[in-house]
Amino acid sequence: MTRNTKRVMRAGNMLNPTPVVMVSCGETVDEYNIITVAWTGTLCSDPPLCYISVRPSRHSYDIIRRTGEFVINLVSQKLAAVADWCGVRSGKDYHKFIETGLTPIRGTKVSAPMIDESPVNIECKVQKIVPLGTHDMFVAEVLAVHAKDALFNRKTDALELQRANLVTYSHGHYYNLGKIMGKFGFSVEKK
């Protein structure tokens, strides 16, 4: 048997990296807000379900709870500093769209604004709220996905998400995604 050279750490969230997203919410221009979230992900393909987890003390929490809507806006490398700023500043003190110069645009399914500068916007409708401890999880149905035209291959019309230069979050730091290593099923593909 080999010697264990791993350290045991206290229990915590070590599932890394996570996506970095800016969640936009609100029904009116005066109420619009942006919260940066790393606790987000996919729950189901059919129906398409995702989640965000938000502390009840956050300004956006009450807005999302009341409206039952939000938009997940993926973060590119160009938006990393803005996403970080939105994550450390409160919507109680700042109108984040005005302060950052981000452009709110109307989606097709929800009242919450999409962020025009984001490469991909995901319109979501809350299905249920699950209290978990420090955060509550908003389980939501994906109603529509919007992607910038520049992300599509001109010949095949396939979405090439790597063109978005997305950012991830890992243990307190932001990272770009890096090179493609393979595609789903590449390990069993016939050569």
Image (cartoon, grey):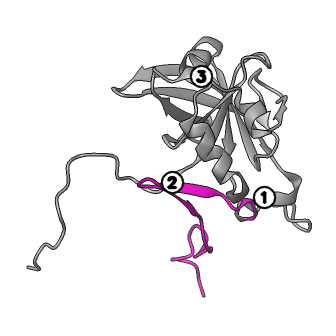
**Residue at 74% across, 59% down:** 164
Give the alpha-carbon distance from disc 3 to disc 1, as whole Å: 26 Å
Give the alpha-carbon distance from disc 2 to disc 3, as whole Å: 24 Å
Was residue 164 drawn as part of the magenta stretch in this picture? yes
Foreground label between 2 and 1: 2
Q: Label 1 near label 2: C-beta < 8 Å?
A: no
Residue named by callout 1: 159
Determine which quarter of the picture holds residue 127.
top right
Q: Which residues are magenta?
A: 163-191
Establish if 33 lies above or below 39: above
SS at circle 1: loop
Disc 2 residue crowd, few under 14, some 14–19, many 20+, Cα 10 Å: some
Q: Position of residue 190 (x, y in %)?
A: 59, 83
N-terminal-most mark, 3 or 1: 3
Amino acid type, residue under disc 3 in the picture: Val
Was residue 11 drawn as part of the magenta stretch in this picture? no
Amino acid type, residue under disc 2 in the picture: Tyr
Give the alpha-carbon distance from disc 2 to disc 1, as whole Å: 23 Å
Q: Position of residue 157 (x, y in %)?
A: 87, 60
Disc 3 residue crowd, few under 14, some 14–19, many 20+, Cα 10 Å: many
Quick one: which residue is furthest to the right in this view? 154
Q: Quadrant of the C terminus?
A: bottom right
Disc 1 residue crowd, few under 14, some 14–19, many 20+, Cα 10 Å: some
Relative depth, front residue between 5 and 78: 78
Q: Label 1 near label 3: C-beta < 8 Å?
A: no
N-terminal-most mark, 2 or 3: 3
Residue named by callout 3: 126
Residue named by callout 2: 169
- The circle drawn on residue 185 is none
Quick one: which residue is furthest to the top in this view? 66
